[in-house]
Image (tube, helix red, strand yellow):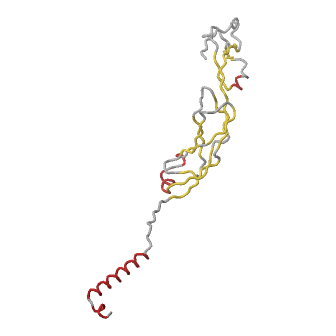
């Protein structure tokens, strides 16, 4: 045994083995560190209410008569800098698609339209009840009524309408039923000659 310890080669091998053992012990005890990235993400409640914007309604066939709400409260999430400096509340919109509505009451989802990088945390309400009414068109002959009395010695004749074709009235069907006639008036007060009125 003493021969081994006195042998130069044995001492070198032993020193190498001890060095390797120490190196492994040191590196096994190290805990890998994960870099921390600060994203600056924060929640912000939009203080002003956001307007509901309807779109897609076929205005030739329907008229929007009411929305159960025209404002929505949003809680949003995004980078602090985007929420506080770049965008204003005018950049936040909530849309409701009316392209598939039917006559009467329709309950539809609200869809937020937000700047890029901003997410919705909550939206109140998330649905809206929309009332639409079908439009109808009906033709009416126009009736003109003279108003006032012409000058002494003159009398009011029968009004002449040009062109004499009927006019078309377009209204929601419920209101159209209440239209009995289309009538205008023309003043002939103190008139001494033909009265021409263009509207």
Point 61% across, 51% down: residue: 122
Q: Position of residue 85 (x, y in %)?
A: 48, 53
Residue toward you, 43 or 20: 20
**For residue 19, side relative to residue 90 (left or right):** left
How many numbered marks have been drawn onto this rendered protein structure? 0
- Quick one: which residue is furthest to the top in this view? 153
Q: Position of residue 132 (x, y in %)?
A: 66, 32
Vertical side of 23 occupied by 103: above or below: above
Residue toward you, 136 or 30: 30
Point 62% across, 8% down: residue: 194
The C terminus sits in image quarter: top right
Vertical side of 98 occupied by 29: above or below: below
Residue toward you, 189 or 184: 184
Point 43% across, 66% down: residue: 35
The N terminus sits in image quarter: bottom left
Residue toward you, 18 or 58: 18
Vertical side of 142 occupied by 74: above or below: below
- Quick one: which residue is furthest to the left in this view? 8
Q: Position of residue 162 (x, y in %)?
A: 61, 10
Q: Position of residue 197 (x, y in %)?
A: 61, 14
**For residue 118, side relative to residue 142 (left or right):** left
């Amino acid at each position: 045994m003493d021969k081994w310890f006195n042998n130069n080669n044995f001492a070198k091998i032993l020193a190498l083995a001890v060095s390797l053992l120490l190196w492994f012990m040191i590196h096994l005890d190290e805990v890998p560190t994960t870099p921390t990235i600060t994203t600056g993400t924060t929640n912000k409640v939009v203080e002003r209410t956001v307007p509901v914007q309807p779109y897609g309604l076929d205005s030739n066939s329907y008229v929007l008569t009411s929305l159960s709400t025209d404002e929505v409260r949003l809680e949003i999430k995004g980078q602090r800098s985007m929420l506080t400096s770049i965008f204003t509340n005018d950049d936040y919109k909530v849309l409701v698609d009316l392209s598939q509505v039917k006559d009467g009451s329709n309950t539809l989802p609200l869809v937020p339209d937000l700047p890029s990088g901003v997410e919705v945390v909550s939206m109140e309400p998330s649905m809206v009840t929309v009332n639409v009414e079908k439009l109808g068109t009906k033709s009416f002959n126009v009736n003109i009524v003279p108003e006032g009395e012409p000058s002494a010695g003159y009398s009011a004749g029968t009004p002449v309408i040009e062109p004499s074709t009927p006019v078309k009235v377009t209204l929601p069907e419920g209101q159209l039923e209440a239209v009995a006639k289309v009538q205008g008036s023309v003043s002939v007060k103190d008139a001494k000659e033909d009265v021409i009125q263009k509207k």
